[in-house]
Image (cartoon, rainbow, N blue to C red):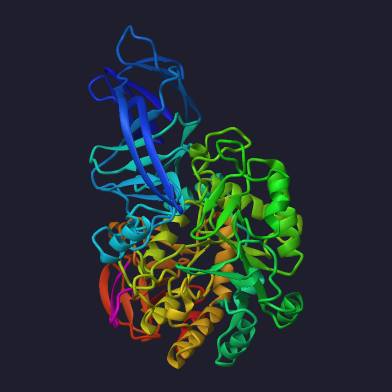
Amino acid sequence: MQLNLIPGGFTLTLDGREILRHTMAAPALFVGQGEERMHMYRGNFDIEDYVVERTALPHVEIDGNRLEFSAARGLPARFVVTLEGNHLLTQSLDASINRVWLRVTAEAGEHVWGGGEQMSYFDMRGRKFPLWTSEPGVGRDKSTEITFKADVTGKSGGDYYNTNYPQPTYVSSRRYALHVETTAYSVFDFRREGFHEIEIWAVPERLELFAAPTFVELVGALSTRFGRQPQLPEWVYGGAILGLKDGENSFVRMETIRAAGVKVSGLWCEDWVGLRHTSFGARLFWDWQANETRYPNLRQKISELQNDGIRFLGYVNPYICVDGPLYPVADAKGYFAKDETGKTALVDFGEFDCGVVDFTNPDASAWFAEEVIGKNMLDYGLSGWMADFGEYLPIDVKLQNGIDAKLMHNAWPTLWAEVNARAVESRGKTGETLFFMRAGFTGVQAHCPLLWGGDQSVDFSRHDGLVTVICGALSSGLLGNAYHHSDIGGYTSLFGNVRTAELIMRWAEMAAFTPVMRSHEGNRPRDNLQIDQDAEVLAHFARMTAIYVHLAPYLKTLSSEAAATGLPVQRPLFLHHEDDAQTYTIQDSYLYGRDLLVAPVWQAAETAREVYLPQGERWVHIWSGSAFEGGQTVSVDAPLGKPAVFRRDGAAMSELFGGLRTL
């Protein structure tokens, strides 16, 4: 990083790339005060800001690597930036400042990606992205009926930028990345041609800059910074993880599904803790221990499954319901977050109340890791679980560390991931136990071994359906999250919106070319088609699991590569074709490793796909064997069971890929 003096100001360059340009006429730094209004309702947020002051600080005094900013010559400095390596350390000299705006140099034609896990837009250029972990919302498109109904009935409609996993980090097509080290609410605004504006509702600790000659090296640097996951557990390669929540009948259904040819690596029963029934549908009983009324002799059955090569997975989250046996234990020890009066804060989760375990209390974190996850789950025999609801920390609770919950809210998913990882490590099962999360923030990569895309609607919709999980995998993958997967068939079924057989089959086709295949019955299992309720769907699912298992040798190489380099399994096309500008905005197809290009059918009633093939390679269509030169868009047939998949000509595992035609 180099500081360069220019008339009236300075520029800051990173390996020759201009990052900041600050002059009296066009300052890059603004500070001020804001009064936010935040309202949370069941994980959804209504957020507004009243800006009391926004003042440019055009005058700068430079002393070595220290930059002091003020509103004009002769006025006291209000803000200091210190250059340290590739970091910009920030300090306010005015205690009233709680808003900072920074303008970063932008170029015409530039593309930007990242922002955590973005579900609607991969290339963020031209849009504004608030970064705040929350429920993503139902529908996520304010022009649709389903989003309108969700807003009216439960304030849960969402918008394109809502995400369980935000992260104030972006990657530029100029081959640099910028990360803001803060947990405060922030906004990345990429709508202007000449600059990107970063807004932070606090004084950040620092801004970190990364640069590399290639995207591959840049992604590697980011994964080194934020953390890398261990390789996938060996047992995962055996097939799909079946999501069934039918009590002890889940075992019967699993055997029927296996008899139809489905290859199974795990049985995931999130209802292992029991159920309660609400207007939203069947909900889990949030007390984290086996319910042997619903699952008799579960420990023995888990052992029998493992002897048969199948692992058992469950479910957990950081809340404990008031009507379960764990609540009085944690309450007596003072392990819950408090309300204004100093009593345990109770959170309404829709017809039942819970306390939230305060992970800023080291004793509470250790108790949850050891007594809940360690003894009740790992020692019981579970090989994995969904670690849910990391985005739900209420913003009005009081925490032991004394930090405002508004500043801890974004940090909560990472603390939650750390509790889970600590429990796994305590049993020596890192790399063998697989828990997965939808919530995330900076640093979650170092603890969470697998992301899942959250609660998509059970449809083909543009902003909440099948296609969104591709965007989520690509955006999060650039920031060090190597493994991503989703609920096959989607999850949220409301207002008469139910699954079709076509949706399940198309989703399974995509999932066969992701790190983990996992089905889900959804929030309303009885209203929605399940994979074992339709012979055609079941046969199709069996074939997709055969494809997944067939590709296991390739996936193992990708898992090894992820651990060594930080490269994700699902990759944007430009990652290996950075000289082909046509690849920079593609978000509905992806590279599976370097050698397979996957373009799932993501719209209803389509039996063909138009696919752009990156230049500089020859691509062979898996099912027909037809070869195409890169640098063009081709149309290929994509009937059910044959998604548009191409192999790179000359790839090391071409023979393995060719074997897909016989399945």
The answer to whether 191 is drawn above or below residue 572 in the figure is: above
| Residue drawn at the location 48% of the way across and 77% of the way down | 525
Q: Is residue 24 left or right of residue 203?
A: left
The answer to whether 408 is drawn above or below residue 381 in the figure is: above
- Please provide percent x and percent y for residue 417: 60, 52
Q: Quadrant of residue 646?
A: bottom left
Q: Quadrant of the N terminus?
A: top left
**Residue in front for this viewpoint, 116 or 413:** 413
Answer whether residue 213 is visible to the viewer in this image: no
**Residue in front for this viewpoint, 153 or 231:** 153
From which residue to which does the magenta span run?
A: 602-613
The answer to whether 121 is drawn above or below residue 255 in the figure is: above
Q: Quadrant of residue 386?
A: bottom right
| Residue drawn at the location 62% of the way across and 44% of the way down | 344
- Please provide percent x and percent y for residue 148: 28, 61
- Please provide percent x and percent y for residue 406: 48, 38
Q: How many circles with numbers are drawn on the protein?
A: 0
- Please provide percent x and percent y for residue 464: 35, 65
The answer to whether 330 is drawn above or below residue 403 in the figure is: below
Answer whether residue 658 is visible to the viewer in this image: yes
**Residue in front for this viewpoint, 215 or 508:** 508
**Residue in front for this viewpoint, 651 or 54:** 54
Q: Is residue 346 left or right of residue 190?
A: right
Q: Is residue 385 magenta?
A: no
